[in-house]
Amino acid sequence: MAEEAAVRAQAETVRRLKQDKADPDEIAKEVAKLLDMKAQLGADEGKQKFVLKTPKGTRDFGPKEMAIRERAFKAIISCFKRHGAEVIDTPVFELKETLTGKYGEDSKLIYDLKDQGGELLSLRYDLTVPFARYLAMNKITNIKRYHIAKVYRRDNPAMTRGRYREFYQCDFDIAGQFDPMIPDAECLKIVHEILSDLQLGDFVIKVNDRRILDGMFAVCGVPDSKFRTICSSVDKLDKVPWEEVRSEMVGEKGLSPEAADRIGEYVQLHGGLELIERLLQDPKLSQNKLAKEGLGDIKLLFEYLTLFGITGKISFDLSLARGLDYYTGVIFEAVLLQQENEHVEEAVSVGSVAGGGRYDGLVGMFDPKGRKVPCVGVSIGIERIFSILEQRLEASEEKIRTTETQVLVASAQKKLLEERLKLISELWDAGIKAEMLYKKNPKLLNQLQYCEDTGIPLVAIVGEQELKDGVVKLRIVATREEVDVRRESLVEEIRIRTSQC
Amino acid sequence: MAEEAAVRAQAETVRRLKQDKADPDEIAKEVAKLLDMKAQLGADEGKQKFVLKTPKGTRDFGPKEMAIRERAFKAIISCFKRHGAEVIDTPVFELKETLTGKYGEDSKLIYDLKDQGGELLSLRYDLTVPFARYLAMNKITNIKRYHIAKVYRRDNPAMTRGRYREFYQCDFDIAGQFDPMIPDAECLKIVHEILSDLQLGDFVIKVNDRRILDGMFAVCGVPDSKFRTICSSVDKLDKVPWEEVRSEMVGEKGLSPEAADRIGEYVQLHGGLELIERLLQDPKLSQNKLAKEGLGDIKLLFEYLTLFGITGKISFDLSLARGLDYYTGVIFEAVLLQQENEHVEEAVSVGSVAGGGRYDGLVGMFDPKGRKVPCVGVSIGIERIFSILEQRLEASEEKIRTTETQVLVASAQKKLLEERLKLISELWDAGIKAEMLYKKNPKLLNQLQYCEDTGIPLVAIVGEQELKDGVVKLRIVATREEVDVRRESLVEEIRIRTSQC
């Protein structure tokens, strides 16, 4: 068939691009083409017309992916609990109006539900807005909580890089009226702990403040009405070069070339405490009230981070803007640094894995009386981290177990199904993790092979002779050693032999 | 204000109904009225018009509810793992066509997403259809997995009874070609283990078989084309009396009165092995091939359940039908039995908490070549279980902790913020769960009160003298005892003192 030949040719293209380590987006494009062609081919052959797939930008997690996911979650949750956080959960959808006016230019990416009569609903876009709605609705003015759940964005997926339309966020937030920068510093400590713990390689946490950005826009001559949209342009600096951002500011957004150039000078600055001190002396910036407040707080933040011993990974970076509308103070973003080519002089950032900031006005937008609850929080972008952990596991050839089964209940002879059922039931009732093959008369070899394949360390073998003697033969899969264990001691014996598992 | 007086009157109505232990649905109705009135009042006062709420039929889980939820999940997951299950996850939405034609009359309850360009999507209605889609898509013919996730049904919510539009399902399924009834028996054992473990009170697991139902319909004179719709009518027998079901069959669905009456005789039968034996001798039923197969398998199932020692809670019940279209063999449903009025003679069922069955054709509906993968599984309806656990906790006045914090880092004097930050950072880095108040100079009394409120067992107090001496004062909250601990031994001391937590 001609179609099949075309599929083979396309598959070859993909293979070659991968071999040449081509641009991931180009590979992704060619893979998508290949999948489309394959789906087309399948549909032509089969009796059904529909395509067997998950929706665009989403994926299933099989047992192996789940094992990796649960490892990462465990590290993150244990950090959140170490910092004394409670946990909450909210519905996957909210009233549409709850999300309206919170995300600026990104609002177009919200998934709406069909109007089937009743309320108009949208899938949550992040966990921050539902959190603020929860606080206002329950009149909570003081809480430290985490929330791990999926959020939804109708964005252009780039799945090979861990960019999906359905993805997990792991959020930690502190709400309440407190002394300046103490909760903010803790959020940065948390990012530092998690990224270190997951051993993802070198990283840097960029820090800025919305008040410094707004002050900078003011002294550069940006009109008030253009602050948010110019902020969105600055936000693109981690992906596109300054020239492009500048031409967007001037061309699309109508900013004067002089103002853009003044911004251009500021946004290339990054550093530590000495840069903060320098900007506090900057003749223009130091005259702006907002910028001065922001710089003062960033200075305090750096003092606390010095006490935490983590300033080595923190960079005060004037090009950091963050896309979302609701930030009001400190903002930050953690990026992993490229390590593959160790000969390149400067480390190149390969993508954001965590971000957050202060949003003191969001809860007040929901409160009928406009009462404010100051908040600061961090969101860990876990999909990108999954991708890295998956790639690493694949490279390492480590065999990952997907069950925790301690023992397989087996028999060497026929007609012992009833005895296997009785024994496994005893083990389950004693809390032992046990499996058996669902066959009346399975071959011993198949039973042993199943243990090899799935990593089950022990086999409990019942046979005529063992039943008469009141024992069970316990086989240790790794060493092939076999011992007779009295039936009443079996549970204890299995516990001892698998206690290190 | 007149409106405020009306709200107060309505609140009084609700209070009275609760005191009188009125019908939960009536209370729910009056509470809804009250909330509406309050919302109205709030909207009139406030500057914003929108209602601050979660979508109809959904709810938030606060820290206390989450603590209960995690307890229940822990019991369920540990059972699933005890039986050697792997875990998977799938997207919250599927292609609309993936769900089409799987749920019979319930399909109208599916949530669709708005057509925003691109694929037509629906929120998943259960975890079984996505599982079958996953198997077919990945050509998996053999797996034992669990999946715990939220599903969505646009049903009439009755939230006081734990009936929501967004709710968790905890599913365990075994897919593969095996010897008859061995996996089926394990599913029932799992239901028995979980309901016993959660100590929800007495329960019964009703069991039937779709082939017995279909055979019964045939010998009663139901035309083939009406099997599924008559099955849906029988499914209502747990909620409405036979007379109503009969009139639906005859009136709405056009069944002959004679056929309906013959069905009426069968569906009142329930019992154990002796009933199975009797029906195997039934002159009409025993002539029907499907019914005979089903009865033979149910008999085998009961033999295995006898080996598991759980037949005491199993009832073979001919009125059990299960609503969903996809079942092909054994079906079952677990109901809790009323216990409050211990003087009533027969236990009354208060609601289904688990259900499942065999669906051998579902995967084949997705496979392009129609290849079948036999499956059997169980779904635990956890929301109903949460409601019971929540009510019980409220009644018991047990104080439930919502964090795991081991120690609060405090100071008795002013100007020690920096020292607190240094100490807490050391503790976090050593893996100790620690908190501090986000104030520069908190009062000692407030710090101790925070421990009382949140159940933190230890306080590490830094002061001028302690810093000089190289020690930290460790206070045990419960006994008010205080000991000086050398700074380098503090982590170990905290670990020892909280090891039982």
Image (spheres, coloured by chain):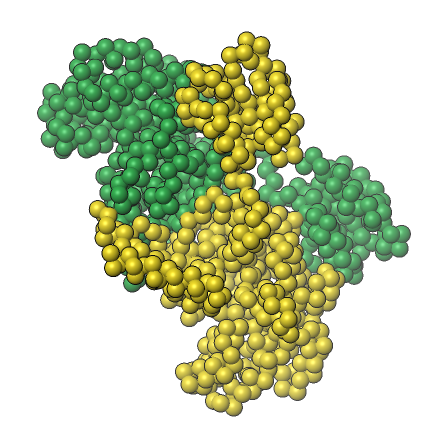
Chain colours: A yellow, B green
Q: What residue is shown at x 55% (from left), y 83% (from top)?
A: A263
Spot occupied by residue A53 in the image (x, y as percentages of width and height): 34, 51
- B207 horizontally vs A251: left or right: left
- B281 horizontally vs A283: left or right: left
Q: What residue is shown at x 51% (from left), y 51% (from top)?
A: A148
Q: How many numbered marks does the figure carry?
A: 0
Asked if residue B147 is positioned above or below residue A255 in the image, the reply reads above
State whether residue B102 appears in this view.
no
Asked if residue A353 is positioned above or below residue B231 in the image, the reply reads below
Q: Nearer the viewer, residue A156 or B15?
A: A156
Q: Nearer the viewer, residue A465 or A257?
A: A465
Asked if residue A249 is positioned above or below residue A204 in the image, the reply reads below
Q: Nearer the viewer, residue B302 or A410?
A: A410
Res. A470 image quadrant: top right
Quadrant in which the C terminus of chain A appears? top right
- B251 horizontally vs B299: left or right: left
State whether residue A390 appears in this view.
yes
Asked if residue B458 is positioned above or below residue A187 in the image, the reply reads above
